[in-house]
Amino acid sequence: MLSLQEISDRLEIQELLVRYSHAVDTRDWDAYEGVFTDDAVIDYTEMGGPRGNVKEVRKFLEMAMPNFASFQHMISNIVLEFDGADAARGRTTCHNPMVLDRGNGETHVFFCGLWYRDVLLRTPEGWRIKERHEEKSYFHNVPSDFAVPSEG
């Protein structure tokens, strides 16, 4: 049976993970930074992005996400394993349709499937993500001329 503390922790972590998705989907980069610890490491390399600290990855997202007409990060199936009272590991499914604007009113939708593998810590401000790794599951319907946006 779950204790009231574990129920609360699970709900708080679920809300944190939803806030991450909402921050990316609304391009609220301050809110994005707020879901991580100051020393967090984020690794998007399996999905074509960078690995770095919060500021470095934020810079990449600020540059890359405007290349898409729209997108949605839909998360589910959150599995959490607690390590004591103040740490947890999580694995969360993400289904992410991405819409490319092809010009002249044409769009192209492709799909990304992944898992977020997280290390989570309780901080004085609440639960935060200390490590986030995107684990690739699939890409579907990616156009042959697509490349991950870069500053190049």
Image: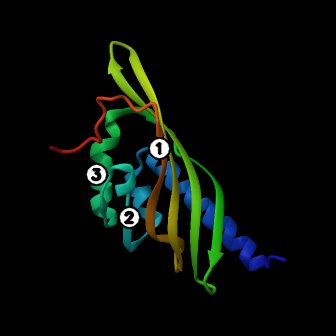
Q: Is residue 59 above or below residue 108?
A: below
Camera-nearest residue between 45 and 18: 45
Q: Amino acid at mark 2?
A: Ile
Name the residue at 31% across, 67% down: 53
List x then y, in percent, for residue 43.
Answer: 37, 62
User: Mark 3 — residue?
Assistant: 60
Q: In the drawing, what numbered circle is on residue 10? A: none
The picture places residue 57, in percent across and down from the top left corner, at 31, 58
- Residue annotated with mark 1: 25
Between discs 2 and 1, the one toward the N terminus: 1
The image quadrant that residue 69 belongs to is top left
Q: Secondary structure at mark 1?
A: helix
Identify which residue is drawn at 47% across, 43% down.
Answer: 25
Above or below, 70 relative to 6? above
Residue matched to label 2: 42
SS at mark 3 in the image: helix
